Amino acid sequence: MNKKSIYGLTIDEMTEWMLENGQKKYRAQQVWEWLYQKRVKQFSEMTNVNKELLHLLDENFSLSTLNIQIKQVSKDGTVKFLFQLTDGNLIETVLMRQKYGLSVCVTTQVGCNIGCSFCASGILRKNRDLVAGEIVEQIMNVQMHLDEVGQGERVSHIVVMGIGEPFDNFNNLVNFLRVVNHPKGLGIGARHITVSTSGLAPKIYEFADLDLQVNLAISLHAPNNELRTQIMKINRAYPIEKLFPAIKYYIEKTNRRITFEYILLKDVNDHVEEAQQLGELLKDIRHLSYVNLIPYNPVSEHIQYERSTKDSILAFYDTLKKKGVNCVVRQEHGTDIDAACGQLRSKQLKKAN
């Protein structure tokens, strides 16, 4: 039987486990320091932990449930990892070098059931959710890669925008956030963490009530229901008139700015008309919102879509600006190494079949 990842335990769960197993309460923080500050690769490296506890840890937990299958390095410094899980499934994680630090994009599910028509992640249906430890381990593997490179760099930002819908794996997502944000864990500030959702309105309310202070991004991609339903099936369940009250609740509850992600698809959603509609849609919350315009990365399985022209992107951007909307055209990373999320995984599974 496969042992579960020790990285899946929050500090409270680790403390509870220690007490249940006859250990002192302080041992939880001691083990966490070895895991996240010293980043040991074997339990035996925890030199100030007694042998009885080392045996218990080794008996119940694993320090590695992910194996690196492929590591692609881009000319711009982006590193894309293809990990194999203990059950043989594959997931992707990406390290990106930004002006503000080192950002890691993590995956929360094996496959995705949301089925956005332009997305490489959703080509393969969801096999299962990742447990919290498997999500944390993605960060740990990237940080250990940085440790090996030896320049003293550390992961400073996290975006939960990889394969899967994070809010469809809500409890594991929240435990992951509690681990990486905790000062005794990786200590990554809540304001440096962004979670992206395709728009599961009930979970947006629930997430707001947790008051975690992390950033929230909404994959919008269209300013009206007809077009959004055409490219995003989730809009049938949570159309704009259900989604936006949840977004406004989140803003009021947390006083945090929302990011809207908008992939520009040639002759689909990139006209000035759609930019004007988007400006109107956001007019009540534009002081606490931000639009990330994303040039489309073509995916061979979605030949119906093409990248918008530079002129179309500029016209869209200018229209939003005139409407008073804060927006930016997102800088691209790793265009020479299967840039679209899910592309590398999909390619490897095709080879295997």
Image: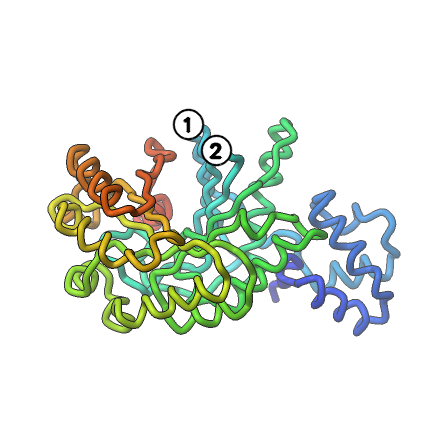
Which is nearer the eye, 170 or 143? Answer: 170
First in sequence, mark 2 or 1: give its number: 1
- When the figure is inspected, residue 92 is found, relative to residue 148, above or below; the finding is below
Does residue 210 appear to the left or right of 247 in the view shown? right
Amino acid at pointer 2: Arg
Drawn side of residue 207 relative to residue 225, left or right: right
Which residue type does callout 1 highlight?
Answer: Asp
Residue at 34% from the left image edge and 64% from the top image edge: 199
Question: In the figure, is residue 114 to the left or right of 275?
Answer: right
Quarter of the image containing the N terminus?
A: bottom right
Read off the residue under disc 1.
Answer: 76
Name the residue at 34% across, 50% down.
Answer: 349
Compared with 36, 132 (above or below) is below
Position of 19 compared to 39: left or right? right
**Mark sitting on residue 286:** none
Give the labeled residue for mark 2: 97
Residue 292 visible? The answer is yes
Which of the 4 image quadrants contains residue 145? Answer: top right
